Image (cartoon, rainbow, N blue to C red):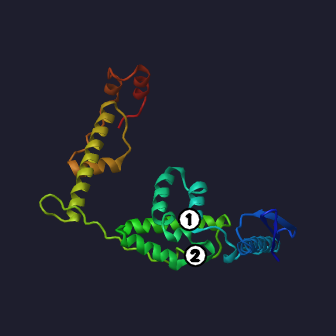
């Protein structure tokens, strides 16, 4: 049991630490009642550490009431040790705005639950945050508690999992020129891409024929004929291809030995 005594105008607290050893330490107090309250807090903290060590020795996880620190401390720990470097600045600003600077950030983890987080999200929504921003904040908080649970800084279920996800309005598709629907606009874009692809296929096929390279890509040429009405011509003479001045001498000799047709 904790006790206090006064020596030379200073108050001293005596309590049993986590290892079972009796300790005495000078404390800052102006009265005996204040000194006794501080000594009791030291005793309770030491008892909590003893219980944690006992549960760990027996393979038992810590209990929610054994958690230390506040909600803001947990978010700060995640920012410093688990948040990716690329997004740390933005997440620090987000959590500082909605958690660290708010009264909910001062709540001890032992008293924190899903109702507090649900109220936090509702307050952010009432302050003018969009549904997408609230969902992003919810996702970040879910990550904070998931990482904290793996690191032993949180026990039990993730309190963010039971909060409600906001519905985000779907964006309307941009109408096509002339008042067409989204499907018409998609069809126009698709036809444009197909037209460019078919033109490129024709150019590639013509270049391959120019140098006498045999083309085995039948589906590509068939698609080119479908879109451009281009008819496949017979392969040019290998001798003419081999004699082309832009083909190097070694390549001309190799092309001349290829079978025709």
| The C terminus lies in quadrant | top left
Classify the position of the N terminus by image quarter.
Answer: bottom right
**Residue 112 in the image, given as x and y percentages of width and height:** 58, 75
- Disc 2 secondary structure class: loop
Kindly state the secondary structure of the residue where label 1 is placed: helix
Give the numbered dot on residue 151: none
- Nearer the N terminus, badge 2 or badge 1? 1
Residue in front for this viewpoint, 18 or 194: 18
Taking depth in this image into account, of 146 and 73 the one nearest to the observer is: 73
Disc 2/disc 1 C-alpha distance (Å): 11 Å
Q: Residue at x 40, y 24 (%)?
A: 252
Specify few, some or many for label 1: CA neighbours under 10 Å numbering under 14, 14-19, or 20 or more. Answer: many
Name the residue carrying label 2. 112
- Identify which residue, 85 or 260, lies in the foreground: 85
Above-or-below relation of 89 to 181? above
State which quadrant residue 126 falls in. Answer: bottom left
Numbered tag placed on residue 72 in the rendering: 1
Q: Name the residue at 52% across, 67% down.
A: 141
């Amino acid at each position: 049991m904790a006790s206090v005594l006064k020596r030379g105008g200073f108050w001293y607290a005596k309590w049993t630490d986590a290892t079972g050893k009796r300790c005495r330490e000078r404390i800052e107090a102006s009265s005996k009642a204040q000194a006794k309250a501080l000594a009791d807090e030291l005793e309770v903290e030491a008892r909590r550490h003893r219980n944690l060590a006992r549960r760990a020795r027996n393979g038992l996880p810590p209990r929610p009431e054994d958690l230390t620190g506040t909600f803001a401390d947990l978010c700060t720990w995640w920012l410093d040790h688990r948040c990716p470097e690329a997004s740390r600045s933005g997440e620090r600003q987000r959590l500082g705005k909605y958690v660290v600077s708010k009264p909910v950030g001062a709540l001890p983890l032992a008293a924190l639950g899903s109702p507090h987080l649900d109220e936090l999200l509702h307050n952010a929504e009432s302050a003018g945050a969009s549904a997408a921003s609230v969902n992003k904040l919810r996702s970040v908080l879910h990550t904070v508690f998931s990482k904290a649970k793996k690191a032993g800084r949180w026990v039990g279920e993730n309190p963010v999992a039971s909060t409600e996800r906001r519905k985000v309005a779907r964006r309307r598709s941009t109408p096509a020129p002339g008042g067409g629907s989204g499907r018409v606009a998609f069809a126009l874009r698709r036809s444009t891409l197909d037209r460019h692809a078919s033109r490129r296929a024709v150019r590639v096929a013509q270049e391959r024929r120019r140098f006498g390279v045999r083309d085995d890509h039948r589906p590509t040429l068939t698609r080119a004929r479908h879109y451009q009405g281009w008819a496949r011509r017979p392969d040019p003479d290998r001798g003419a291809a081999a004699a082309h001045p832009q083909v190097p001498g070694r390549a001309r000799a190799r092309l001349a030995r290829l079978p025709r047709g």
